[in-house]
Every structure is written in structure tokens, then in C-alpha cells.
Image (cartoon, rainbow, N blue to C red):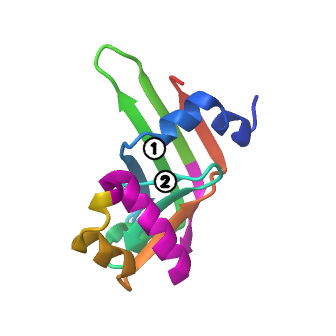
Amino acid sequence: MPDQSEKLNTTPVRNFLSEVILARLATTNPSNHQPHVVPVWFEWDGESIWISAFRSTRKLREVEKNPRVSIVVDTDERGGAARGVLFEGQAELVTDSQIIISRSTSIYTRYLGEQGVLDPAPQSWIIDPENTLIKLKPEKVYVWGL
């Protein structure tokens, strides 16, 4: 059975994770154990998946209390087979402002384009003091259809 890096370093998986599609982040409410799943913008750097999140959001508050998360990136194409990657592990919250600015700019550019990221709204998100990063270096990875 291949290790995690072997699964993620194939050309089809790398190409898939570079597509501009949404991921879904699953966290758990620590008081009632209710799962919480939200669509998120992400970036894969070859080792970790990064998500920009504001401190006031439920997802970030839950990661602070229970860092065990799952993140799925998948598609179900009409007439085609489903493709996807599921990441599991313990997330890390990154609060270093230099890393946040750099990585958030990269994530927002990925989804909004070179010009779109220059608009006032994303520029304010990048430097907002609430902006934080969720970083997951996966412990387990499941790949299908790739």
C-alpha cells in the first residue's frame, strides 16, 4: 500500500488539486459532537492543505477546541466518474501575520484571479486581524477516480 506522499505526488492528483474547485472542511462541535461541514477555498502546496478562515467563524472556533478535521476535494461530473481526495488529521492554526498575508494572497488569487484579488474586499480580508490560516498536513489520505 503506498504511503501518503506517494498517493499525493502522482500527476493526476497534483493536477486535480490545482483545479479551482471548492473543498469542504469538516469540524466537530466539542459540546454536542455535531459535525459541521462548510465549503472553503483552499490551496495545496504538495505537503499541506491551507484554508483562510476568520477567527469569528464556527469552523475556526471548533478547530481551536478540537483540531481533528477532515477535508474533501471532489467532483462528480455529469456522465463521468467521481474524483476526489479526502485528507484527515490534526489541523494547525497559523497566526503569523507574514505567513497569513502571503498564503491568503495566494489562495484568494487562485479563486479571484490576478486582477480580482486587487479589489478592495479581498485586500481587506488579507490584512484583517481576524484572518487566520488552517493548515493540515494530512495523516491519512484517500484518493478515488484519479
Label 1 crowd bin: few (<14), some (14–19), many (20+), radius 10 Å: many
Residue 83, horizontal then vertical, whole percent: 45, 27
Query: Which-is-in-front pick, marks 1 and 2?
Result: 2
Residue 123, horizontal then vertical, whole percent: 31, 74
Residue type beneath disc 2: Glu
In the image, which residues are magenta?
Answer: 88-114
Seen from the viewer's position, the closer of residues 100 and 51 is: 100
Residue under numbered circle 2? 43
Magenta residues, dominant SS class = helix
Residue at 57 percent across and 37 percent down: it is: 14
Compared to residue 137, the image places residue 74 above or below, namely above
Compared to residue 142, the image places residue 104 above or below, namely below
Seen from the viewer's position, the closer of residues 90 and 98 is: 98
Do we see residue 64 in this rendering? no
Residue under numbered circle 1? 72
Q: What is the count of numbered marks? A: 2
Residue 99, horizontal then vertical, whole percent: 55, 75
Compared to residue 5, the image places residue 75 above or below, namely above
Q: Picture quarter containing residue 26?
A: bottom left
Element at badge 1?
strand
Q: Picture quarter containing residue 89?
A: bottom right
Along the horizontal axis of the image, is 22 left or right of 63?
Answer: left
Q: Do the residues bearing badges 1 and 2 touch, measured as CB atoms within 8 Å? A: no
Residue at 57 percent across and 49 percent down: it is: 88
Element at badge 2?
strand
Please say whether residue 22 is one of the residues in the magenta stretch.
no
